[in-house]
């Protein structure tokens, strides 16, 4: 029960409305406004930036302090000591795996990575030049047609089976999006490979050669997946929850999250970093673009610097910066003109008072874009990679919502259209 109360007084109201104030385990208090509808009043919050639409125990962000916690564990510690699949287990189950639980979970995921053979035919219905996100959105939504058993969303065991399936199959489908576009045969997953290693094998392997995946690149890919695993109630996660509140099946819900992530304002940030680097073109142009970035009247913006949520340093960027160095060293890409531009921009942002005062530090998208480009992943596939990493967060939030008492989502509106008017009488 709430021990605090807020009081809202509206002009013409005799008595103020009392609203309970709740405290979470950390973070700001929230005012419970659910009773306002009975008074004929709604709150107005475009974008829901000041509204808690749910309670959750999965992820906590303190943007001002640069903190990201999954089930209480700092992202820096998970990136150092954990793996993507262990983080998936943590998000789904609430605790780190004990004893042989991780081995059993990894085996469960490994043996769900292959997809129904008819999905190969499904892909062949797409044009060769179809956008990878269009294919991913369509195929994930169609998974319910192939895996329609164990889809009782009120059954916790069925929910976990669906969660394991979608986490396991996402890298397979992501690689198939790439292979379809370049006309190469789809590669089957290998049960003796780890999650990220298998993804890179399915991306770049061919039937003509034995599998060969660099441990450095596998580690980098695993870290990228881990750092994107969940990010609280962002647009795509909220979309998954809203779709899930209708009782929709998990594959349709994840497809809705993919559709939301596809938007350039959400999932396209690391792709925008590469486009910016291509636009700058040469190190000799950097000073000009830095000046443009400082000019408030110039539409040019440095992409991959600063963050809407983190008002300090993005904690994920601290982790991935070192990974970026390892990848560029292994691939010998440090002299690539594009990466030289990126390095100089990074140095300026970390030393120039203009950027320091405004806390415009490089974020996770800046480094992940550079890594993915160095590995050889085309920019059109960057958001597909993002979706693959974010899937455990989406499915964990879906599972959490269905584990609690929930109501179908129904946002309100501030109506500004015509009031009632009569249909005009026409002569004749």
Image (spheres, rainbow, N blue to C red):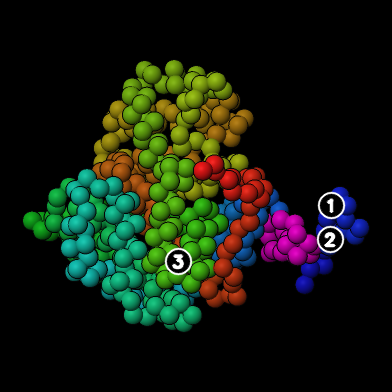
In the image, residue 344 lies at what x, y percent? 41, 27
Q: Is mark 2 on a helix, strand or loop?
A: strand
Magenta residues, start to end: 19-42
In the image, taking residue 100 as reference, residue 57 lies left or right, namely right
Against 198, residue 420 (above or below) is above
Quarter assignment of residue 23: bottom right
Please give the residue where the numbered disc 2 appears in the rendered image.
Answer: 17
In the image, residue 342 lies at what x, y percent? 39, 31
Residue 10's mark?
1
C-alpha gap between disc 3 and disc 2: 37 Å
In the rendered structure, does residue 32 fall within the stretch colored magenta? yes
Question: Residue at left 44%, top 17%?
Answer: 288
> Residue at the front extreme?
428
> Residue at the left extreme?
208
In the image, residue 285 lies at what x, y percent? 38, 19
In the rendered structure, does residue 34 fall within the stretch colored magenta? yes
């Amino acid at each position: 029960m709430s021990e605090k109360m807020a009081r809202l007084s509206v002009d013409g109201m005799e008595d103020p409305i009392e609203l309970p104030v709740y405290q979470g385990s950390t973070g700001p208090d929230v005012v419970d406004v659910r009773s306002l509808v009975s008074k004929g009043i709604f709150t107005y919050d475009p974008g829901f930036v000041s509204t808690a639409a749910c309670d959750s125990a999965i992820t906590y962000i303190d943007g001002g302090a640069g903190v990201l916690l999954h089930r209480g564990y700092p992202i820096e510690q998970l990136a150092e000591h954990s793996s993507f699949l262990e983080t998936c287990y943590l998000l789904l189950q609430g605790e780190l795996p004990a004893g042989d639980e991780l081995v059993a979970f990894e085996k469960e995921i490994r043996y769900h990575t292959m997809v129904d053979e008819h999905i190969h035919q499904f892909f062949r219905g797409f044009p060769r030049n179809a956008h990878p996100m269009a294919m991913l959105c369509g195929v994930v939504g169609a998974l319910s047609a192939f895996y329609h058993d164990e889809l009782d969303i009120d059954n916790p065991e069925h929910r976990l089976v669906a969660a394991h399936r979608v986490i396991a199959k996402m890298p397979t489908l992501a690689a198939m999006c790439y292979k379809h576009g370049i006309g190469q045969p789809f590669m089957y997953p290998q049960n003796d490979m780890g999650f990220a290693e298998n993804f890179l094998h399915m991306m770049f392997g061919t039937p003509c050669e034995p599998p060969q995946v660099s441990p450095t690149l596998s580690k980098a890919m695993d870290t990228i997946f881990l750092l994107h695993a969940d990010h609280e109630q962002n647009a795509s996660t909220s979309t998954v929850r809203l779709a899930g509140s209708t009782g929709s099946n998990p594959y349709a819900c994840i497809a809705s999250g993919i559709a939301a992530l596809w938007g350039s304002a959400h999932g396209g940030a690391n792709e925008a970093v590469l486009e910016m680097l291509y636009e700058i073109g040469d190190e000799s142009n950097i000073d000009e673009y830095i000046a443009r970035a400082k000019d408030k009247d110039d539409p040019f913006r440095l992409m991959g610097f600063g963050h809407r949520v983190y008002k300090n340093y993005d904690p994920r960027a601290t982790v991935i910066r070192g990974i970026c160095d390892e990848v560029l060293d292994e691939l010998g890409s440090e002299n690539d003109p594009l990466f030289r531009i990126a390095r100089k921009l990074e140095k300026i942002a970390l030393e120039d008072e203009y950027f320091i005062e405004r806390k415009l530090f490089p974020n996770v998208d800046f480094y992940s874009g550079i890594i993915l480009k160095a590995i050889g992943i085309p920019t059109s596939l960057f958001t597909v990679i993002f979706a693959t990493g974010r899937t455990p967060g989406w499915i964990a939030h879906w599972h959490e919502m269905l584990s609690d008492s929930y109501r179908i989502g129904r946002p309100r509106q501030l109506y500004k259209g015509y009031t009632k008017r009569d249909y005009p009488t026409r002569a004749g």
